[in-house]
Amino acid sequence: MQTRREIIKSGLGLAGIIAAGKAPAALVRSLIAARSALTGSKKLPYDAEVEYLVSTGTQWINTGVKPDNNTQTDIDFMVLGNYSTYDTVAGCEGNGLSYRICARYGTSNRYWVGNSNASNYAVTTRTFNERQNVKFNLPGNVVEINGTQYNMGSLGTYVFTASLMLFAEGWGSGATFTSKARIYSAVITNCSSGELVRDFIPVRFTNELGQSEGAVYDRANPTVGMNPDGSPRTDGLYRNRGTGAFLWAEKQ
């Protein structure tokens, strides 16, 4: 029989240890109890994490977050080609302002990051079909695109009444300017307090019809979420608010 230290060094994992009969029953029970204390007994609401979600242009996620001056968004994505006027990866609009990360502004060959005041946005050459990372609204009115920082100037004071969407732009109670894109992760932070507001990872789960469905799971607040009709959930899953279904790629 192996000791706890030998079991840890063996790399078998708990299931492998039990199957191989390599630990005393009492030690196995203590390991299970320790793991349960760390992870909790509640089963995660999804079947597996996936590499990314894909919107074909009609699927989008309502994050439930209404941005203000302190809202920082860090998003890892890939735009797969033109679909709408703005091809918005994440954003919302209202009161003449936009909080937006999109692949183009009108027909220009640019990423557009910022609000509707032309003096307050930062752009860089757009690239389709390549993975990108944007950190928007960093302290000091800075946006970072693929490691390069740009000063956006003062954004003024704003509080949006529309929610921030993924794969689209929040408008009123719905969404517009959707995108054909992949999202690998999306993190929303209050850059003043440091509070982690959303920490989205792409997942697949089994829905009420017994079918696999793509969604995002919020690791920051796993007791809230949203259904396709906008009704609340209590398990951290945010499901597609658009039409059709998300595609995804399994983790390698």
Image (spheres, rainbow, N blue to C red):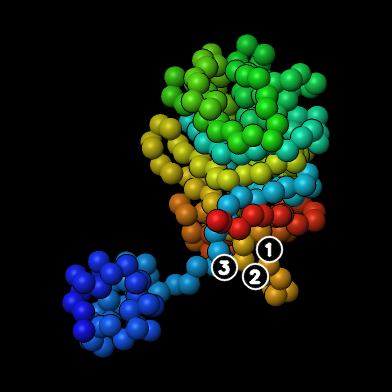
Q: Secondary structure at mark 3?
A: loop
Tag 1: amino acid: Glu
Tag 2: amino acid: Thr
* Most foreground residue, 109 or 119: 109
The image quarter containing residue 13 is bottom left
- The mark nearer the N terminus, 3 or 1, is 3
Horizontally, residue 191 falls left or right of residue 178, namely left
Instruction: Check if mark 3's residue and mark 2's residue have beta carbons within 8 Å.
Output: yes
User: Where is mark 2, residue-wise?
Assistant: 206
Residue occupying image coordinates x 59% and y 33%:
132
User: Where is mark 3, residue-wise?
Assistant: 47
Residue occupying image coordinates x 57% and y 68%:
47
Q: How crowded is the residue under tag 3: few (<14 C-alpha within 10 Å), some, or many (20+)?
A: few
Instruction: Check if mark 2's residue and mark 1's residue have beta carbons within 8 Å.
Output: yes
Q: CA distance from mark 3 to mark 2?
A: 7 Å
Q: Quadrant of the C terminus?
A: bottom right
- The mark nearer the N terminus, 3 or 2, is 3
* Most foreground residue, 156 or 204: 204
- Picture coordinates of residue 108 (x, y %)? 76, 18
* Most foreground residue, 165 or 159: 165
Tag 3: amino acid: Asp
Q: How crowded is the residue under tag 2: few (<14 C-alpha within 10 Å), some, or many (20+)?
A: some
The image quarter containing residue 163 is top right
Q: Secondary structure at mark 1?
A: strand
Q: Residue furthest top?
A: 119
User: Where is mark 1, residue-wise?
Assistant: 213
Horizontally, residue 182 falls left or right of residue 223, namely right
123, above or below 207, in the image: above
